[in-house]
Image (cartoon, helix red, strand yellow):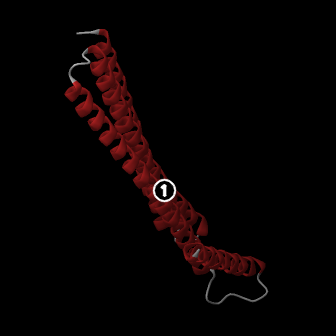
Amino acid sequence: MDRNTILLLIGFLIGGITEITSYLLRKRAEERTQKRVSDAESRVEKEPEKAKPAWDLARVTLESYFNKNLAQVTAIFRLCIFVMFVGFVIIVWGISQAIRSPESTIVAVVSGSAGILTELIGATFLIIYRSTMEQAMKYTETLERINSVGMAMAILDTIPDSAQEGNLKNATKATVVKLLMQQANENSEVTVANQED
């Protein structure tokens, strides 16, 4: 084997080890997040009249979604970089073959065409990456609205039916519910305005 092939193999080996390590770390983080969700769900079941456990459950669930979304976006980005790197290597290999044997243009044309095609595929992945990021932002905004409404409902449920009007705690809860609902409505209007633009 020549020196370039050995360097290429070492590069692929390092990339593979990096991906495997990254996968294992993501898996461990996902397991920890799932445990946190389970713990939050059990706290909600134990204390249904309290708003804090419901709030924690909503926060942990939203955080879980963010982490999954980030992992997917990172995987798409890494795939883009890998494909574009492979395309670049194919182009460089084609150029080196054309320099080594100038009488054989077929190898240079085929490898150059293959490299350019691979680069176009990588660029397509980048376009998919961009649209995935835009979609993730829309999902995030939707989840934030759902989270706000859910928190408002959880707080509203803690106000007893026979609540007195002068009770400061119940009045504060009602104000918090009103603010959360206003925030969800404002975020919804901003999202609709952004989609119309």
Q: Quadrant of the C terminus?
A: bottom right
Residue at x-position 61% and y-position 80%:
156
Quadrant in the picture for residue 14:
top left
Q: Can residue 49 be seen in this view?
A: no
- Using residue 90 as the reference point, say whether residue 156 is left or right of it: right
Q: Is residue 25 above or below residue 92?
A: below
- Using residue 59 as the reference point, say whether residue 71 is left or right of it: left
Q: Tag 1: Cα neighbours inside 10 Å, few (<14), some, or many (≥20)? A: some
Front in this rendered view, residue 102 or 18 = 102
- Looking at numbered disc 1 in the image, what kind of residue is underneath it? Met
Which residue was labeled with disc 1?
133
Front in this rendered view, residue 142 or 177 = 142
Q: Position of residue 154 (x, y in %)?
A: 56, 75
Residue sticking out furthest to the front:
103
Q: Where is residue 58 in the image (x, y as percent from the top left)?
A: 52, 64
Q: What element carries label 1?
A: helix
Front in this rendered view, residue 32 or 80 = 80
- Using residue 39 as the reference point, say whether residue 53 is left or right of it: right
Q: Quadrant of the N terminus?
A: top left
Q: Position of residue 149 (x, y in %)?
A: 57, 76
Quadrant in the picture for residue 93:
top left
The total of numbered circles placed on residues is 1
Q: Can residue 56 be seen in this view?
A: yes
Q: In this view, does 89 lie above or below 143?
A: above
Q: Where is residue 70 in the image (x, y as percent from the top left)?
A: 47, 49
Q: Is residue 152 above or below residue 67?
A: below
Residue at x-position 68% and y-position 87%:
163
